[in-house]
Amino acid sequence: MCLALLPFQVFSQDKKPEPGVFMKDPGSELWRQVRQRDMEGVGISQVRGVDSGVLINARGDQWARFRMTQLSTYGGFAIAGIFAIVILFYVVRGSVPVEGGLSGRMVKRFTDYERVVHWTLAIVFLFLAITGLILLLGRPVLLPLFGKEVFSLMASASKEGHNLFGPLFLVSLIMMLISFVRRNIYEKGDMTWLLKGGGLIGDGHASGGFFNMGEKTWYWMVILIGLVIAVSGLILVSPSLGQGRVIMELSHIVHSIGALVLMTVSVGHMYLGSIGSEGALEGMKTGYVDINWADAHHDRWGKVCHEQDLIISAEEYARSQGQKPGADKMETAEQSK
């Protein structure tokens, strides 16, 4: 540290301060300029590195205040709001049934590899989302609940886990891009699905292919925003690459906002892919879906399945899953006795 930056006065036990030496707050103007609030200045330092000549980074304080007030507050409201909307929608409408019910006749929708890719990305994303929310919202939400010691342990573990699994998110994202890109290219009829809100707006059926417009849009959100999140995250955990503080701050903003957007929309995706739509979860559980579900939600693809005779009976499906044909019916009959 440069001692010249520490203004002080030495008083002898025998002598009084000499006239003209004593100054009230002699370093106030110096530190005001050092903080660089009104100007961008770079000093001279023997340390060689990016921003090494900047003694105090005032923008760091501004970013910290933005993160602890606006970002955490609005992000918390967004996450809570989407959960409230989903719960309200489920209470009002419930699970969307398949017209005519499930037939038991199944068609192959996803390969085992595709399901592994999907669940790998989903699990890694959920882990990063939870640990990220602990780091973002932990101080105002968890600290009062668990106390300093427990929250400190949670925050430390979340930080290490978040940094460790971040690169795995990028790898699984690239696998998702390669595995599903061909079937997520927009095509004729997708815009009609969007204008009808997936069947929620107006009359008539909202036609869809293997993936409908909503699923394709969600896919491209995951890929594009996910890549931004992954790259900005790598910048944040690699300060030795030579990027300056401004790049780090911008990366932090992009990383946090992008992650909040994906987390918010993913709640709706998880709802519609599970309890929100009858028969939807089966595709990612076993790779097969009921043909009635395909006809109801992806009629253009369902038509191809009929034409190419890709539909298997309930007995064939049971055998493919290692079950005895009719086992489900026998179990249901036993339960009804």
Image (spheres, rainbow, N blue to C red):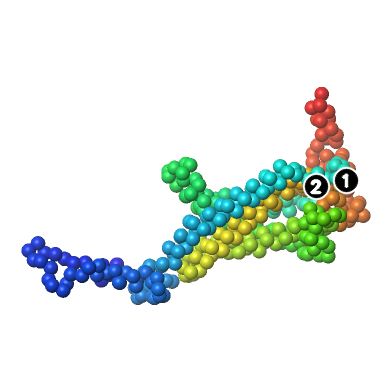
Kindly identify the residue that appears in the image at 52 percent across and 55 percent down: 72
Type of amino acid under label 1: Ile
Q: Which mark is residue 11?
A: none
In percent of width and height, residue 119 lies at: 68, 50
Q: Position of residue 111 (x, y in %)?
A: 77, 52
Q: Is 44 rendered above or below residue 221?
A: below
Q: Helix or strand or loop: what does disc 2 sit on? A: strand
- Residue 120 in view (yes/no): no
| Residue at x 73%, y 43% (from the top left corner) | 92
* Residue 288: image tag: 2
How many residues crowd around disc 1 within 10 Å: few (fewer than 14), some, or many (20 or more)?
some
The residue located at (73%, 49%) in the rendering is 272
Image position, residue 142 (x, y; %): 49, 45
How far apart marks 1 and 2 lie (CA) works out to 10 Å
Q: Secondary structure at mark 1?
A: strand
Q: Is residue 64 left or right of residue 335?
A: left
Vertical position of residue 271 compared to residue 61: above or below: above
For the N terminus, the image quarter is: bottom left
| Residue at horizontal 12 percent and vertical 71 percent from the top | 18
Residue 241 drawn at (x, y percent): 49, 68
Residue farthest to the left, as pictured: 14
Query: Which residue is labeled 1 in the image?
Result: 312
Foreground: 30 or 327?
Answer: 30
Within-10-Å neighbours for mark 2: few <14, some 14–19, many 20+: many
Quadrant location of the C terminus? top right
Q: Are circles 1 and 2 on residues that touch, CB within 8 Å?
A: yes
Of labels 1 and 2, earlier in sequence is 2
Q: Is residue 39 left or right of residue 234?
A: left
